[in-house]
Amino acid sequence: MLVRGEHGAQVPDGLFDVIGIGDDGALRLPGNLPRDAAVVVDELTTEAATAISDSGLAPLFFLSAEGDAGEGPWRRLSVVPREAAEPSCSVRPYVPVNPLAARDRHHGFGFMSYILVLGGVTPAGADPPPAVAWLTAAFHEADLVFVSDAVASAWRGRALRGQVAVDTQTDFWRLLAHASVCIDLDPGPLIARECIEALRFGTPIVVPQGSGPAVTHARAGGGFTFADAGELIDAVGKMQVETERSQVATQGRRYADETFGDPFGVVADIRALLARP
């Protein structure tokens, strides 16, 4: 794996050998890369495109690009089903979850079936996002868990009841698995992994309108999108009705398992991708 940093410096991270290729304005690839090595860039900038294209490597794929950096020999690689995606450049990543997380709730809380809100990065000491206040006011008797910066905060009736650390991935999966609904306020721009993980546990998702891949997951998995407080509250309210929630949960789990739950599928997709000229 090639990353920005001191050129040639290698740092093992347990899965990849991470190799530095320099900093802004001085990107240089290692000279010992196989000429037929496939290159996949997460965000293709003009500088990265120039450095890699000059190396003579091929084939070349990117997940997102700035400006016109994706033109020429580069092909956009789709990792989320989209109507406009080229089938020959699509890969279905395997998104694992631990099914054992669904057996026991998070040990820091004595309740389940809470409203779970994922907030991304929140500055230290800052108030939670407005969505938390909207939901705790609208569902005064419901428990709400807000997760940000590896800390889970329990709210009820607009009052903070306690906080616990989310120390491991299994802790986080437990929070996903035992929620009545998951609202992801800041889903990732490439795959929205936490949304997929929630769906694989059968937890319906609600995401902001226009949030890219997360919207695809919500539509395909029976979830919801929102543009304002009213739409958010309406969507979460529907998921407090067990008959409606059960139907959405089944649809979401089926979509996530079929699309992102096959570890052999991603191998087949990559093999087919690299076999094409």
Image (cartoon, rainbow, N blue to C red):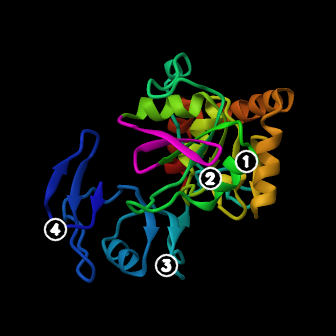
Question: Which residue corresponds to mark 3?
Answer: 69
The amino acid type, in three-letter code, at marker 1 is Ala
Q: Which of 31 and 168 is in front in this view?
A: 168
Query: Which residue is located at x 54 percent, y 49 percent?
Result: 273
Query: Residue 63, image x and y in percent?
Result: 52, 62
Q: Which of 254 and 262 is in front in this view?
A: 254
Q: Which of marks 3 and 2 is in front?
A: 2
User: Image quadrant of residue 58?
Assistant: bottom left
Query: Residue 272, image x and y in percent?
Result: 55, 44
- Compared across the picture, whether 179 is left or right of 232 comes to left
Q: Earlier in the sequence, mark 1 or mark 3?
A: 3
Q: Earlier in the sequence, mark 4 or mark 1?
A: 4
SS under mark 2: helix
Query: Which residue is located at x 67 percent, y 47 percent?
Result: 136
Q: Which of marks 3 and 4 is nearer the N terminus?
A: 4
Which of the numbered marks, if any, corresponds to residue 7? 4
How far separated are the C-alphas under marks 1 and 2?
20 Å
Q: Which of marks 1 and 3 is in front?
A: 1
Please determine whether, in this image, residue 157 is positioned above or below residue 60: above
The amino acid type, in three-letter code, at marker 4 is His
Q: Can residue 272 be seen in this view?
A: no
Which of the numbered marks, if any, corresponds to residue 218? 1
Q: What stretch is highlighted in magenta?
A: 148-167
Q: How crowded is mark 4: few (under 14 residues within 10 Å), some or many (20 or more)?
A: some
Q: CB of mark 4 within 8 Å of CB of mark 2?
A: no
Residue 269 counted in the magenta span: no
SS under mark 1: helix
The amino acid type, in three-letter code, at marker 2 is Val
